[in-house]
Image (tube, grey):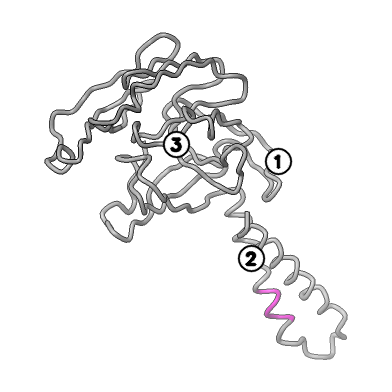
Amino acid sequence: MGFSWFLITACVVCGLAWWSGHRYPRYRPMPVWVDLSRTVFVVFLFLLLVRSFVVEPYRVPSASMMPTLQSGDYIVVQKFCYGLRLPIINTSIMPTDLPQRGDVVAFRKPGDESRHFVKRVVALPGDRVFYRNKVLRINGEPVGLEFLQSATSEQANSGFIEAIETIDGTRHRIIHQRYSDNGQQEFEKTIPKAHYFVMGDNRDDSQDSRDPEVGLVPYSHLVGKVSSVWMNWHDFSRSGTKIQ
């Protein structure tokens, strides 16, 4: 929100400066600051439109989405996927599409909209979700889970168990922590209208819809769909990684 305010303020200030230049008679040369304000106004307006309606970069600050996303990943969030919204007030002006199970989404935390989270949508409005003993069930059916035997020694020593989860035909990797008891906690809920149940791919180390401080994510709080990793300063090989 802070950067959006900056862009809007810059557009207003530069636009007014550019407009004030029309008071000068045509036979007099235009002041340099007027011509400069016109150029800067166009740049700031372009950035505002792209950031508000097309794409926005984010930095992943935690390991809650491992192994799909790593801490320090800079990701691209497609803002137009779930509807166009006005900056600052986040009012929807044009609905486009709805999230699907398996989508990785960015959203504003309910109750604290200054914080942005990135999680995976696992249940849609009307779904019945049940989670216990590291098993996720949607509408009574267990979600496909294939534990991998080829865990690296580093993962084994850290206690990670990697698996491939299949939701609606989409396969993605998740991890459990071998010695964590978070998976033993039972959760069962029917998702109400216009809300979504999200989870981190690092299932035992993620603050998500299982946590009362986050809860279900309203449609109005969605920012967009995560499409790719564009940079990680600690691992350049991740640049350009598509998110599934």
Q: From mark 2 to mark 1, how far is it between C-alphas? A: 21 Å
Q: From mark 3 to mark 1, how far is it between C-alphas? A: 26 Å
Left/right placement of residue 50 relative to residue 76 reads right
Secondary structure beneath dot 1 equals loop
> Which residue extends farthest bottom?
28
N-terminal of the two: label 2 or label 1? 2
Does residue 194 show up magenta in the picture? no
- Can you tell which mark lies on residue 44? 2
Q: Position of residue 66 (x, y in %)?
A: 32, 40
N-terminal of the two: label 3 or label 1? 1
The overriding secondary structure of the stretch rendered in magenta is helix
Q: In which quarter of the image is residue 9?
A: bottom right
Q: In which quarter of the image is residue 190?
A: top right
Does residue 36 show up magenta in the picture? yes
Secondary structure beneath dot 2 equals helix
Amino acid at dot 3: Gln
Q: For this rendering, which residue is in front, 85 or 94?
A: 85
Amino acid at dot 2: Phe
Amino acid at dot 1: Thr
Q: In this view, does 67 lie above or below 198?
A: below
* Front tag of 2 and 1: 1
- Can you tell which mark lies on residue 91? 1
Q: Could you tell me which residue is drawn at 43 percent across and 43 percent down? A: 227
Q: For this rendering, which residue is in front, 225 or 194?
A: 194
Q: Residues within 10 Å of mark 1 (few under 14, many from 20)?
A: few
The boundaries of the magenta stretch are: 34-39
Secondary structure beneath dot 3 equals loop
Q: Could you tell me which residue is drawn at 41 percent across and 8 percent down? A: 140
Q: For this rendering, which residue is in front, 195 or 209?
A: 209
Q: How crowded is mark 2: few (under 14 residues within 10 Å), some or many (20 or more)?
A: some
Residue to which mark 3 is pinned: 207
Q: Where is residue 18 in the image (x, y as percent from the top left)?
A: 77, 74
